[in-house]
Image (cartoon, rainbow, N blue to C red):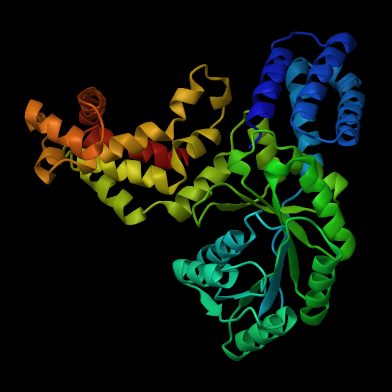
Amino acid sequence: MFNNLSSHLTSIVKNLAGRGRLTEENIKESLSSVRLSLLEADVPLSVVENFLDNIKNKALGQKVLSSLRPGDELIKIVHNELVAILGETQAPLNLQATPPAIIMMVGLQGCGKTTTVAKLAHWLKTTQKKSVLLASADIYRPAAIEQLQVLATQVDVNYFPSSSNEDPAAIAKAAIKHAKNKLIDCVIIDTAGRLHIDHEMMAEIKHIHQEISPLETLLIVDSMMGQDAVNTAKTFADTIPLTGVILTKTDGDARGGAALAMRVVAKQPIKFIGTGEKIDALEPFYPDRIASRILGMGDILTLVEEAYHKVDHEKAQKLAKKFQKGAAFDLEDFRTQLQQMRNMGGIKNLLSKLPGISNLPQKEQLMNDGLFVKMEAIINSMTPRERHFPAFIKGSNKQRIAKGSGTEIQDINRLLKQFEQMQKMMLRLKGSKMQNMLKQLQGAL
């Protein structure tokens, strides 16, 4: 998300930061470029104008113009205004209730609502240590009930069975009663969506809401809809008391207009964003962290949190101990690292959260997850002996590996060359050197 906007804003900000002195003229010139970037990102004009007026008024103040580093002061102003437009502080999920905490999910058909229900259940289970019950009140879409049942099994949470000939409000009430009896912490009710907003749909969700009085009513919105997503949120908010929004498909949205306008136009906080297809690709929405990402400053905090929750710590410790003893780094270890990286959302997700990556000329090549998938496929096609002793891989072995992994001989050669360079680097860090480096890193942390 925000790829296009981020590349535009970082170049503008970099240009400003490089100037020794800021004048009213070059500030206006830069803000004109920011205006164009925001409009291209599909941010509504009213939001853009208000955003730029706030920056202009603060940027032309004495504090910026008389500062020793005026460019840095202006970047700080832009960052703070982005945080303000995105919602100031993170809007946490409210679970403060006598169990079960009831969460109602609403949205249009095709926005990824049912999948998001499962993602939220997974997040509640893994990060909040809550027991969860899923129930489908979508009696219209073919296989909607079956889809949720499959997803509930996949994320290993409780599921309340329902059928298409039942009343949606009755299903929701029965699920809540079941959760109370079984002492389950949270109930998530998946409601029906339509291809467009209609009177029948709104009347139904309004009735369900009145019957169950949910603690959280979350609207699921496809971020790729841009301004239409904001208009949808506004219409839903006028019908039922929403408590927040979950933006889906943000990994495919290069603009980010919906996120920037949601709080201002729809008056709704974004609570989560869907960042991919995997069941764990849902993260809480932090305005300050997102603002830093937009300006190319990275998001180390989210990266650390992802590492904590998604990395296999047992494997990581085993590998660290191996290095400390000075044992050789082999292709088995390399494959483990590739798998750990994939668990964290791939190289693209990792690098997008590192500061300065957006400024690199070859960032698209660096962020190519396909290369790493190919590497893992090559290693998977090797025998255990070849993984432990790559030096024994000769011409005939390479042909077999290439055939098994669906790659070319030159791909095998490239991987072996890269691995050889990595192995040399690891050899330099053998034994005490590795221990010293780990101690230094621990001290820094």
Q: In the visual, does 135 lie left or right of 367?
A: right
Residue 129 seen: no
Q: Quadrant of residue 421?
A: top left
| Residue 304 place in picture, x, y as percent | 50, 46
- Taking the spot 75% from the left edge, 42% from the top edge, the residue there is 258
What x and y, as percent, mark residue 86?
A: 77, 43
The residue under the point 79% across, 70% down is 205
Q: Name the spot of residue 363 as percent of width and height, x first.
A: 50, 23
**Front one among 175 and 17:** 175
Quarter occupied by residue 179: bottom right
Q: Nearer the viewer, residue 240 or 333?
A: 240
The quarter in which the N terminus is drawn is top right
The answer to which of 22 and 412 lies nearer the viewer is: 412
Whether 301 is drawn above or below 208: the answer is above
Residue at image point 66% right, 34% down? 2
Say which quarter of the image contains residue 81.
top right
Q: In this image, 28 relative to 7: left or right?
A: right
Q: How many marks?
A: 0
Residue 119 seen in render: yes
Left or right: 389 as drawn, with respect to 44: left
Q: Say which of 156 and 311 sits in front.
A: 156
Percent coordinates x, y for residue 379 in the rendering: 22, 39
Instruction: Tell me if residue 398 comes above or below residue 216 in the rendering.
Output: above
